[in-house]
Amino acid sequence: MTATASTVHLLEMATGKLVEADLLDQVEERHLKDWDTQWRPLVAATVRRLVTTNAPMSQWPQSFHWNWRQKIEDMKGILSGASFCIECEGVTQGMMALNVTSARTRLAQQKGQHLVYVEYLEAAPWNRPEHVAQPRFRGIGSILMYAAVARSQAEGFKGRVGLHALPQSHVFYADKCGMTDMGPDPNVQKLHYFEMTVEQAEGFVDGKERS
């Protein structure tokens, strides 16, 4: 099945201008090729630099070991799996993998309800300050989270979303997305678990649509 695209806009950091991009509801082979031929070399260069300078682990991009080809392959044929990506100027700028059926909410006010669980979300390395001094585009993470909320609403889950976040992403999910940080999960490498309520989803969507 071919991916369906909708128009979104990214902020080009060098110019301050909004640039048109496509949000696609499926990661396809061309996106994985971009990851393999364009994302991975830049990540490898960052790792070499960090090793050479003996940089502390706090400066390392915490997703440097992620293998998107394997992640998408693992989702094939699984009904609970879904994926999204963003293309701009013919290049993949970000990807996201979702679980749309298996997860349940944990917050007391909505405990046990269905939600969309974000398995993985990542912007291309040239859009991230861990890799480059001047990121190229801004807004990838917010747009992908908007897509996750929209998928939750389409599934009848009213915008409820959950995820486990790498430490470098805590501020983004708490402040930018307005999610509740439920603290470290001892069952998932002590990663902090974040959850979005119906009300938080409405606030996030309203803010995104006004921006």
Image (cartoon, rainbow, N blue to C red):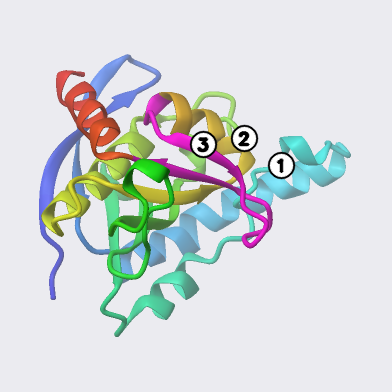
Residue at 47% over, 30% down? 174
Q: CA–CA distance between discs 1 and 2?
A: 7 Å
Pick whichever of labels 3 and 2 is earlier in the sequence: 2
Residue 44 x, y percent position in the rendering: 66, 53
Identify which residue, 6 or 165, lies in the foreground: 165
Question: Is 84 located above or below residue 62 in the figure?
Answer: below
Give the number of marks: 3
Residue 165 position within the rendered picture, expressed as x and y whole percent measured from the top left: 54, 46
Query: Which residue appears at 13% of the width and 70% of the height?
Result: 2
Q: Amino acid at mark 3?
A: Asp
How far apart are labels 1 and 3 at the CA level? 23 Å
Residue 15 in which image quadrant: top left
Q: Is residue 182 magenta?
A: yes
Q: Determine the residue positioned at 41% across, 78% down.
A: 73
Instruction: State which mark lies toward you, 1 or 3.
Output: 3
Q: What residue is pinned by disc 2?
A: 130
Which residues make up the magenta segment? 176-196
- Nearest to the eye among marks 3 and 2: give it: 3
Q: Earlier in the sequence, mark 1 or mark 2?
A: 1
Placement of the C terminus among the 4 image quadrants: top left
Are discs 1 and 2 less than 8 Å apart at CB?
A: yes
On screen, residue 175 versus residue 81, left or right, reads: right
User: Residue 79's mark?
Assistant: none
x and y percent of residue 129 in the render?
57, 30
Q: Which residue is mark 3?
A: 181
Q: Secondary structure at mark 3?
A: strand
User: Would you call the spot at circle 1 few (<14 residues within 10 Å), some (14-19), or many (20 or more)?
Assistant: some
Q: Is residue 90 visible?
A: no
- Name the residue beneath numbered marker 1: 60
